[in-house]
Amino acid sequence: MNQTIAIGFAVYLLLILGVGIVTARYNKTLPDFLLAGRRLGPWIVALSERASGQSGWLILGLTGLAYATGLGDPSGTKSQPALWASIGGCSGVALSWILIAEKLRKETEQLGALTLPRYFELKFRGHDLAIRFVTTAIIVFCFIFYIAAQFDAAGKSLEQTFGFPHFTGILLGASIMVFYTLMGGFFAVAWTDFFQGIIMLVTLVVLPLVALAQIGGIGGLVDKVSSLDPEYLTLFGGRRGWPLLSGVLSGLGIGLGYLGQPHVLIRYMSIRSVSDVGKAKSVAIGYAILTYSGAVLMGIVALAYFGVGHFSDPEKMMPGLATAIFPAWFAGILICGALAAMMSTADSQLLVTTSSVTEDIYHQSINPRASQSQLVFLSRMVTFVIGVAAISLAQLPSSIFDKVLFAWGGLGAALGPPLVFSLWWRRTTRNGVLVGMILGFFTVIVWDNFFKWTGVYSLLPGFALSTTAVYIVSLRDRAEIR
């Protein structure tokens, strides 16, 4: 283990833990713990939203995908080529901020909703166990897999950098994420995400640009990668027909998932005022363009720098490139960027999962008279239990990329169309939302298990069927009322 990197890493972790301890004193009520009292500024919200929305999937998963398959995946082994996944991701960020942010901020405050399940309940009936329980169940189920992917990413990063056994890395990363989320709630999550977002930006922009300069700039990059396989640098990777169409659609379709991610949506709900949304939107979209582009560039640069097959696991490429390019002390900072990506997503997902159990099940259905201190205590206990469950799932053999895509697809298909309809279409009904959620969620599960061979990402059919269901059922309900 390089002592310089270890010292830098230890300092970083101590700072993160310190934030959790300091911000614990701000959590006197459940709204404080879950939404920071709705008093966060636009820069904090924007960088926190981007840091939580991008995760280890971007900094290890997408960079590793680009390293393994180039821009368009000439091997045809992945349903989402790196370039098109990047374009889809950037488009989804913009779409979510434009369609959802301002309206969700207004309506959740007017309704007094602290969570997405509670928003749907209050929007349509005021007291509706079915819609609240279905929404909560979908969030908890998907987020356990999503959090597990972040813990897995922490294990891989620490294994590649320090030589820790994979499970030891998972335990270390998970313990820190659970601790500061458990202590500091959304205050800790938002502020740590802000600083982690800055580190991620430096990692995804500075590292590939410096590495690019070392291999001779764009000219050197093209020469080296073309000598391996010219198709690595083409937009479509030499694909034709259905593999081409399904790959492009699946990559672009990733962006639709942003419309239904509770850990992203909660940022919109926490912003200080509706007037701050415009500034936060500009910052978030600009950040997304820089980091998604940097992730793909990093993978291509690493392909030129190391050649094919240098890493047995492509998702360990980023720490390897950082230690090869920079002095140990600076490489340590950039490797912290990888951990920052995982932490900034896992902490948010832990918090959303906790809120779903504490507020939407316990407080609303079991003990409506629970005191604020009881609810905060229960939230911390639930955070711990969810963390333990995710640690066990983190050891599943699937890649970070695949774990995230499954959870991302389930949430995007189940929650995205009902949320957009509820905010923009007055004729949306409770039954339309409920059927859309259930159909979208189960379509993703069925598609991933029986139709993955088509090469189409399960989010696309799930999103399409959910949209259709919300629309048709809502129209039928309105017709019956007349």
Image (cartoon, grey):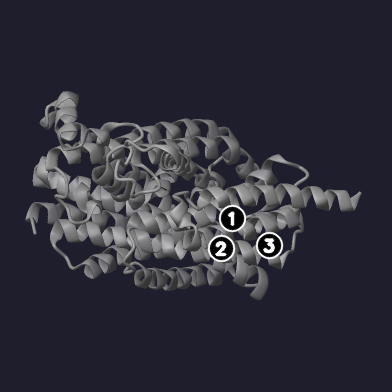
Asked whether, in this view, residue 69 is left or right of residue 10, the answer is: right
| Label annotation for residue 195 | none
Rendered view: 28 above or below 476: below
Where is mark 2, residue-wise? 138
Would residue 16 be seen by someone viewing this image from the given angle? yes
Q: Residues within 10 Å of mark 3 (few under 14, many from 20)?
A: many
Q: Earlier in the sequence, mark 2 or mark 1?
A: 2
Image x and y of residue 241, in percent: 43, 38
Q: Left or right: 197 with respect to 219? A: right
Q: Is residue 211 above or below residue 170?
A: above
**Mark 3 to mark 2 CA distance (whole Å):** 11 Å
Q: Nearer the viewer, residue 57 or 341?
A: 57
List x then y, in percent, for residue 254.
46, 45
Mark 2–mark 1 Cα distance, whole angstroms, equals 8 Å
Badge count: 3
Q: Choose the circle earlier in sequence order: 3 or 2.
A: 3
Tell me the residue at 82%/51% (across/down).
476
Q: 286 above or below 114?
A: above
Residue bearing the label numbered 1? 414
The tag earlier along the polypeptide, 1 or 3, is: 3
**Mark 3 belongs to which amino acid?**
Ile
Which residue is identified by label 3? 131
Query: Residue at the spot x=25%, y=62% of the render?
Result: 155
Residue type pointed to by label 1: Ala
Q: Quadrant of residue 168?
A: bottom left
Nearer to me, 114 or 154: 154
